[in-house]
Amino acid sequence: MATLEVPIPVVPIEPKVDKEHPMKCVEWHGKKSVRVNTARPSPLITHPGDAIIRVTSTSICGSDLHLFLGFMPGMKAGDIVGHEFMGVVHDVGDDVKGFGKGDRVVAAFDIACGDCFFCNKLKLFTCCDRTNPSKEEEKLYGDRTAGFFGYSHLTGGWPGGQAEYVRVPLADMNLLKVPEDMPDEKLLFLSDILPTAWHANELGEVGPGDNVAIWGAGPVGILSAHVANFRGAGNVFLIDEFDYRLEHAKSRMPFVKPINFKKEKVYDIIRKDLPYGPDVGIDAVGMHYAHSMLNRMEIAVGLETDTPEVLNEIIYTVRKGGRISIIGAYGGYVNHLNVGAFMEKSLTMRGGQTPCQSYWPKLLEMVKNGELDPTIVVTHEGSLEQSTHFYQIFNDKQDGCIKVVMHP
């Protein structure tokens, strides 16, 4: 069997650095260990297509908790984390055409070349074939994803955005120029979670009158409900185990029908309102939230990497002929997936990392016009120095924490 040859990335991953001008950044140092380093050399232009961004706002994503808890392979001590960030262009390489010093920009979490088959023809920028040389990911998946900022060496080992400065390669492809007169909080989430919420609805083909059930009331789940309502959905159910998250969502989106799966049987509650079940089920949970003793044991001993519990409940609950959208991050293998029910019920399942660049033009206009308001998820704001505390309360579901914004 022929093996794929891993192409050399179109730009070098390791940046040139300025040791004379250290910066602050958040580094991963093991399971449940993130630290602020105040003496990390700041990045320099390394390739003519680079831009250096002075970060004004960055945030902690639910996907970052997979790293924090040690569920994402390929992490190395000292890796700079974070993939949601925006700021001001500090410097640009000679080949950058669309941006100049002083421009206000949002960066995509995914790093795309714009020229490969997947970027140019399919517009699947998170499947870019030229920005991630990981042989490990190729062995695991049969192919590689694009490179992602701050998200392990499985996705390229690119330094992340929870820092004062970030090098953005292929800047013309991976930056979005944004208005000067809008606050960071309105724009920051164009880096990931707002496009991801839109992508969740795209994968599920949510349209007028569709009944939608969303598993996970974290930031992406809440914004997925917000987007579903904008797209004309009928009933929108939001499922979680924490009342404070459900109450937060309900207070900002009165149309939401919250369900606490620890207190109520999800299938029974939804089928009481919708005898056939919802048209669309969205998985905004992902890999490491195992609840059954069986799945916890199998994960602990390495018999599976992820739990199928949410997917099984969606398969069971969605109507026959319904659609399943997976935007919660999964890393590898699950056991006990109810593939029989999936097949016999004539369901469709789609998933994928979000190609932010595909959605930027329409989403920026919707945010500018007030049609979408991503700030509904923000609960905490502070400095980069508080990141250790913020990671802890976000992971431990303390202090009503749903979304953290940090300002370096």
Image: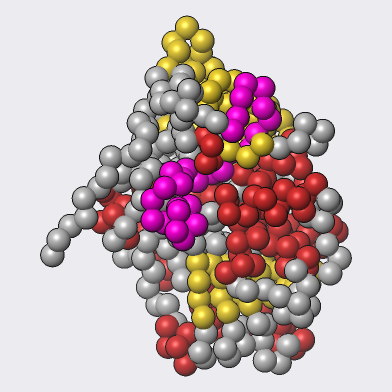
Q: Residue at x 76, y 50 (%)?
A: 365
- Residue drawn at x 45%, y 53% as measured from the top left: 119
Magenta highlight on residue 105: yes
Q: Is residue 103 visible?
A: yes
Q: Nearer the viewer, residue 399 or 375?
A: 375
Residue 288 percent location from the top left of the image? 48, 58
Image: magenta residue range: 98-126
Residue 54: image x %, image y %?
61, 23
Is residue 345 shown above or below 153? Answer: below
Vertical comparison of 131 with 44: above or below: below
Q: In the rendered view, does 309 fall on the left or right side of 228?
A: left
* Between 134 and 312, the one nearer to me in the picture: 134
In this orientation, does residue 67 appear?
no
For the rendered model, the colour scheme is: secondary structure
Please state if 350 lies on the left or on the right of 276 as rendered: left
Q: Residue at x 59, y 33 (%)?
A: 98
Residue 124 at x, y percent in the picture: 48, 57
The residue sitting at the left extreme is 1
Q: Is residue 195 magenta?
A: no
Residue drawn at 72 percent across, 48 percent down: 364
Q: Quadrant of residue 331?
A: bottom left
Q: Quadrant of the C terminus?
A: top right
